[in-house]
Each structure stands twice: as structure tokens, then as C-alpha cells.
Image (cartoon, grey):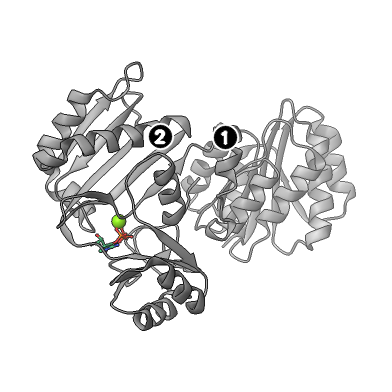
Amino acid sequence: MKIHEYQAKELFAKYNVTTQEGYVAETKEQAVECAKKLNASMYVVKAQAHCGGRGKAGGVKLARSIEEVEAAAEKIIGMRIVNKQTGAEGKLVRKVLVTDAVNIKKEYYLSLAIDNEHAAIVIIASGAGGTEIEEIAANQPELIVKQLVSPITGIKDYQARYVANRIGIPKANVKEFIVMLKNMYKLFVEKDCSLVEVNPLVETEEGKLIAIDGKVNFDDNATFRHPDILELRDIHEENPKEYEAGQHDLNYVSLDGSIGCMVNGAGLAMATMDIIHAFGGEPANFLDVGGTATTERVTAAFKLLSDKQVKAILVNIFGGIVKCDVIAEGIVIAAREVGLNVPLVVRLDGTNVERGKEILKESGLKIYACDDLRSAAKKAVEMAG
Ligand code: ADP
Ligand code: MG
């Protein structure tokens, strides 16, 4: 799960990770009120959307007066940020963060992430922080410092000091840096994060370290332990279909192809996608109805598949715990409710398969029933054109 920069900064403030005062606005009038509260001489107005690269996209603007704050907010609210991180449709900006402008002397990169290979939290840092960090990582990886953290000891002072020295934190700020990094770690562990990132961490002309951007992601499998974090969820930022699927405990991922798939079990879903590819087709989604599919869930799943990009639907169910007749009933109900108007190919096998096939036949719906996955996938690819 992702949150906005302003929410990340609220968490930073709670964990004593030095950041700035700032207020959120949904209209330019509110932005003016926010600026007045700040009592600053220069402001920055920042798009709040679940993506990075806002600066380069024109979503971060410096304002020298309250009037300029208003003008910047007017430009940013309602804009669409389109970059590598957002995909082609981009992200609509609904809110801005108004904060004071800092005098930047140097920008650093500092984050904590999960290193899957070592099953540990890793510190990633660089003296070349800011908006070019992706290019730096690709072209000058030697400028990036990594340090694995032992889950038993947490971050040790010597480790934090080593990172500070490597990335060129001034001597006078090293203590401050160590405290900041350890507080980020505390946040990471206590809230079950998957990423805590500060880019840039700024050294100001006045000689202070401040997190002027913040990104915090959470492990979805642990959010149930953190009702306070779940409250930060902004469903506008999520794929509406994936959100809807989550409400029904369905494992769903939107893809770009034209064949809607309904499958039980993640392994079978992957195999189904592979075989669709093998026959020259492209799946429109990954949808795993799970092992305990009820008629309601199958109906919900089927509705998710009824999308204009979907030209054919392939149902591939192996009834182990889930019974084929339950799946068949769900398909029939849902197909009637959504007014199915694309070809439906069904391959059922396993528990109660005969009863399942009967239900499909009796329904009178136009269904292509197949006995094995190969012929079903082939048929679906053919029907999708
Ligand atoms: P993004 O990473 O999405 O581009 P950032 O918050 O990192 O957004 O802002 C991009 C750049 O804008 C920063 O690297 C920094 O140079 C500048 N910037 C952002 N906030 C401020 C601020 N409060 N004061 C001065 N400069 C800022
Ligand atoms: Mg940034």
C-alpha cells in the first residue's frame, strides 16, 4: 500500500525524522489559507499523487508570494502526471501540499527497503540525490551505497556513520544523520513498511538536514495490524478494478491484453497466462478466485472481467476444494446480470464437474465448453481475434 508525501511526512514527524511543516489543499483557495498558516517568505506547492517524478512533470512549483501559491495550485490541481512510474494513463492530481521553500545546499538520497535476496532490510544512500537518482543508479552505480541491516541488532551507529561518510554528509551533521536514519528504521519496522524513502534529504545553507520529500510503502500482508495506516489509504489512487477485487478477497491484477481469465489458484493462473501467450494471445488480467470460491465471489469475479478491452473470457477451474457446480452457478448468474456479450470459453475439471457442465448447458448461454486447457486456450485466442 502506498500513501501520499504529506502523509509520509506526518509519519516522519511522529518518528522524529526531521521534515517541514506543510498543509494540504484541494482547491486554490485552500492553498492560500495553507500558505498564510506557514508564515514563510517563499513557498513550494507540490502535487500529491502516488508517483515520483513530480518535479520533472511540472508538479512541484516554487512560489514567491501568496498570489504565486494560488496560481501554482490552480495549475497543479487537476493536472495529469504521466511518466514511467504512472503508466500511459497517468495520475490525476487532486491535492497539493503547500510548504516552505528551503535553501538547498546539497541533495542526498536515503532509503530503507527490503533486500529479497538477503531477506533483510537494506540501507540505500547516495550523495547524488534528487530528481536524477534513477539515472545515477543505472549509469553510475558506484555512487550508490548499500548496507544490509541485521534484524537482530538493527542499525548500529558505526554502520550509519559509514554510510554518512561514504555519501559525504558534513562532519557537523553526522550525529543528526545517524538519529534520522535510526528513526526511519524504527518507522520501517514498527509499521511493517516495504519502503521508507527520502529523496532528497537536503543539507540546507543554514547547515541542517531536512527530509523534503518522503515516500512510505507498506507490506499489504501486514496492514491488518495497523488500522491507523489503513486509514491513510486513498482509493482514488488505486486501480478501481483491483480495489473492487480486494473487497471480495479476489487476487486480481489488470493487464493490457484482450482475454479475461478466471482461474483458481495462482499457479494455475500463471500456467493459463503462459498457454494463452503460447497460442499468440494476451491476457487482460490475472484473476485468482482462490480455493474457497462461493457463488457471490465468482459473480463478483465475473463482473470484473466484463470490461470493454475484453474480447473473450476464459474460465479455467480445477475443482479441488472449490466445486465445479458452484463455479458454474456463479458464471450463469453473473453472465445474466452483466449481459454477457463476448464469447465465453469454459474448461472445468475436478469435483462435481458433471453437475457443473449440466448447469452450464441448462443455462442456455452460449458457452464453449472444453475438456482440456490447450483446446480451451486455443479457442479463447481464436474468439478474441
Ligand atoms: P519528486 O521526487 O516527485 O520530483 P520532490 O519533492 O523530490 O518531488 O521535489 C523535486 C525537487 O524539487 C527536489 O529535488 C528539490 O530540488 C525541489 N524541492 C522540493 N521541495 C522543495 C522545498 N520545500 N524547497 C526547495 N526545493 C524543493
Ligand atoms: Mg523526490
User: Closest to the observer: 135 or 129?
Assistant: 129
SS state under label 2: helix
Q: Is residue 74 left or right of residue 201?
A: right
Percent position of residue 142, x then y: 10, 40
Q: Residues within 10 Å of mark 2 (few under 14, many from 20)?
A: many
Disc assigned to residue 266? 1
Quarter of the image with the C terminus in it: bottom right
Considering only order in the chain, which callout, 1 or 2, is on the residue closer to the N terminus? 2
Instruction: Residue 101: give x, y in percent of width and height.
Output: 28, 65
Q: How many circles with numbers are drawn on the protein?
A: 2
119 versus 25 height, above or below: above
Type of the residue with mark 2: Phe
Q: Residue at x 78, y 61 (%)?
A: 338
The quarter of the rendering in which ligand 1 is drawn is bottom left
Q: Callout 1, which amino acid?
A: Ala
Residue 188 is marked as: 2
Q: Disc 1 on helix, strand or loop?
A: helix
Residue 115 visible (yes or no): yes
- Mark 1 CB within 8 Å of ligand 1: no
Q: Nearer the viewer, residue 173 or 213?
A: 173
> Is 308 left, or right, of 27 in this rendering?
right
For the residues carrying marks 2 and 1, which lies nearer the camera in this image?
2
Residue 38, located in which quarter of the rendered image?
bottom left
Task: For residue 46, say whether it is visible.
Answer: no
Q: Give the residue at x 18% y 60%.
A: 104
Q: In this view of the protein, which residue sits in the foreground, 138 or 32?
A: 32
In this view, the residue farthest toward the front is: 39
- Which residue in the rendered view is the most extreme toward the top? 152
Tell me the CA gap for discs 2 and 1. 29 Å
Q: How dense is the environment of label 1, judged by Cα within 10 Å: few (below 14), some, or many (20 and up)?
A: some
Question: Is 312 on the left or on the right of 39, as rendered?
Answer: right
Above or below, comparing residue 376 to residue 27 in the picture: above
